[in-house]
Every structure is written in structure tokens, then in C-alpha cells.
């Protein structure tokens, strides 16, 4: 769409990130076969040029659509019309200890810091998923209801965006962990027994990452995610899991997430300005090319 010709990055955000739509932004309605989606364009001047960021609220509107009711088909079709790489922001609970990529400047405190429990990882709350497990139950997870298409999900998250993101995180001295994301149906939190089972196969648990990533792959769009670890999962802390806790941690890390988004957009703006998009290393646009029967 001509309206979005200067957009270099589409951000899909959830809890705590609706504020993005209020930052030097104009809101537009995008009509899709699955319903209308409202997207905001942030006029950032990323990369020192006239490039913009599009923001789509995953929960659409003031009434906050619950995770099991999100219209993922419409969200991704709207992103397809914008036609820019997708950077998703998700909130997750941590189920087990995962290795930390240490981008911080070493000091005495961090030298002696040990990571023995999920609680200790809340000091370094950013997680970059490289794979996922789908435990949702009632969500429409494909655009292809009228034909058989087997989408390749070998690399569900765009390797190109992930590599650029790692560079940005290093540049900003932001430490992170990475691993497998497990998506549940919601809207309830998980039980302790479920977490014990899930933790055998995945590292973090959330409610919004799937089928978003699948539909993006079907649409041939580059898609990657940055998760904020907001809490230890059920049974891994003395405290009960609460939505208030999630909101507090998200708000605490908003500034850093905004810096990451701006820096990543600047990289894409520079790439677009130098017409070097052909250097992409991913196969996202070819995910369905060999899957049609």
C-alpha cells in the first residue's frame, strides 16, 4: 500500500505497548478479508531518513481483546499489506534456567552473580525465541482452509531479523537468553503440573506467539520476536502469578524495548536506503513454495 511505502518495520505489540500508537503517530484502518485492523505509523526518521515504523496492537482497542480471542488472521493480513519485516513483542513466564548471552559491561556484582533459579533471570528479562511449541486448542492457525499447503517451519523465526537483532542487542549492551517458546490457549495462567511438563520441552511460556508466527510464515513475511520475561511460571516462586506483576515488569522495561525497536528500524532503514535488501539470508518468502499439493 502506498500509504506505508516508507515503513521499514512493522511492530506487533501486546500488554504495555499500546503507548507506541501514541508516539508521534497517526492511526489508519486496514481492511482485510478477516476484519479491520487499526495500525499506527510512527514518524521516526529512522536511519536519518524519512522512514517510518508501523505499530499494530495485538489486543486492538481500549477493551483489550483476550489472547484466545485475538484475530491473528486479520493482524497478519494487515501486516502483509504493510509489507515490512515484522518485529513482535511478547510477554512470557520463565519455566527453567537458560544460558545468558552477556552483553553487559562486566563489574564485580555481575562477576559474582549466579543464575540458579528463574527468579534470578528477572534481572535480565529479554528472551529471543528460536523455536516454538504450539499447545493452543481452538485457534485458526492457517490461511489455507480451501487448499492443502504444508508450510516449512524449520526456522519459524526469521534468521535474518534475529541476526540483526543480536547485533542491536550487543550494540546497546542488552543481555538476553534464547530458546524455545511454548504457547498456551489462555486466558488463564498455567497450572504447576502443566509447567512441570512444559519445562521438559521449552524454556518460556506465553499466550500470544502462536499462530502469529505461523501465519506470518504462510504470508511469506519475515518475522521475529523479542520476549520480556515478566515472572517465574507457576510453582517456581513463592508467589502466585498475577497480571499486575506482568504489567509492572513490562512497564519497567518499556524504555529499553523502545530503544531496541528504534535501533532495529534504523538498521532496516539503512539497508533499504542502500538498496541492500537482497542480502537477506532467510528463506521466509519461500516457506510455502514446496508445500502445495
Image: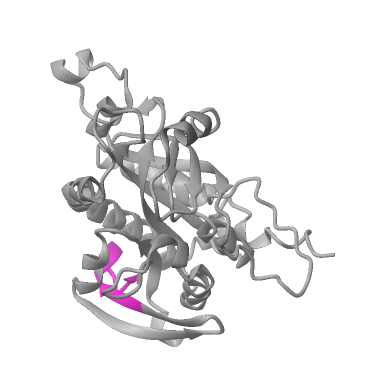
Q: Is residue 51 above or below residue 164?
A: below
Q: Is residue 185 highlighted in magenta?
A: no
Outermost residue toward the right?
Answer: 293
61 above or below 279? below
171 over 101 or under it: above or below: below
Can the viewer see residue 67 in this picture? yes
The answer to whether residue 85 of the structure is visible from this angle is no
Q: Which residues, given as a range, are shown in magenta? A: 39-55
Picture coordinates of residue 178 (x, y %)?
43, 35
Q: Position of residue 183 (x, y in %)?
A: 49, 48
Which residue is at 61% across, 57% downward? 284
Residue 51 included in the magenta stretch of the image: yes
Residue in the foreground of this view, choosing between 235 and 144: 235
- The one nearer the camera, 192 or 221, is 192
Residue, x 58% and y 49% (percent of image)? 156
Q: Residue 62's image quarter?
A: bottom left
Amino acid at each position: 500500500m502506498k500509504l506505508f511505502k516508507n515503513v521499514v518495520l512493522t511492530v506487533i505489540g501486546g500488554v504495555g505497548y499500546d503507548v507506541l500508537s501514541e508516539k508521534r503517530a497517526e492511526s489508519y484502518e486496514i481492511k482485510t478479508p478477516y476484519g479491520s485492523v487499526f495500525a499506527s505509523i510512527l514518524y521516526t526518521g529512522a536511519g536519518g531518513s524519512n522512514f517510518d515504523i508501523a505499530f499494530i496492537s495485538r489486543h486492538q482497542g481500549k477493551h483489550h481483546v483476550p489472547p484466545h480471542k485475538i484475530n491473528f488472521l486479520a493482524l497478519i493480513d494487515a501486516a502483509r499489506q504493510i509489507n515490512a519485516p515484522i518485529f513482535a513483542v511478547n510477554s512470557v513466564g520463565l519455566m527453567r534456567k537458560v544460558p545468558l548471552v552477556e552483553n553487559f559491561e562486566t563489574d564485580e556484582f555481575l562477576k559474582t552473580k549466579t543464575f540458579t533459579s528463574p527468579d534470578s533471570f528477572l534481572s535480565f528479562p529479554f528472551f529471543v525465541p528460536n523455536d516454538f511449541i504450539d499447545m493452543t486448542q481452538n485457534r485458526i492457525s492457517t490461511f489455507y482452509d480451501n487448499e492443502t499447503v504444508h508450510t516449512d517451519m524449520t526456522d519459524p523465526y526469521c534468521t535474518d531479523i534475529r541476526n540483526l537483532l543480536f547485533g542491536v542487542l550487543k550494540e546497546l549492551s542488552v543481555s538476553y537468553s534464547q530458546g524455545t517458546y511454548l504457547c498456551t490457549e489462555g486466558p488463564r495462567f498455567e497450572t504447576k503440573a502443566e509447567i512441570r511438563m512444559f519445562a521438559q520441552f521449552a524454556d518460556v511460556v506465553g499466550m500470544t506467539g502462536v499462530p502469529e508466527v505461523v501465519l506470518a510464515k504462510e504470508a511469506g513475511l519475515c518475522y521475529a520476536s523479542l520476549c520480556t520475561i515478566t515472572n517465574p511460571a507457576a510453582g517456581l516462586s513463592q508467589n502466585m502469578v498475577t497480571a499486575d506483576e506482568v504489567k509492572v515488569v513490562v512497564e519497567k522495561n518499556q524504555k529499553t524495548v523502545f530503544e531496541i525497536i528504534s535501533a532495529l528500524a534504523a538498521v532496516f532503514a539503512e539497508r533499504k536506503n542502500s538498496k541492500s535488501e537482497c542480502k537477506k539470508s532467510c528463506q521466509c518468502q519461500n516457506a510455502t513454495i514446496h508445500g502445495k499439493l
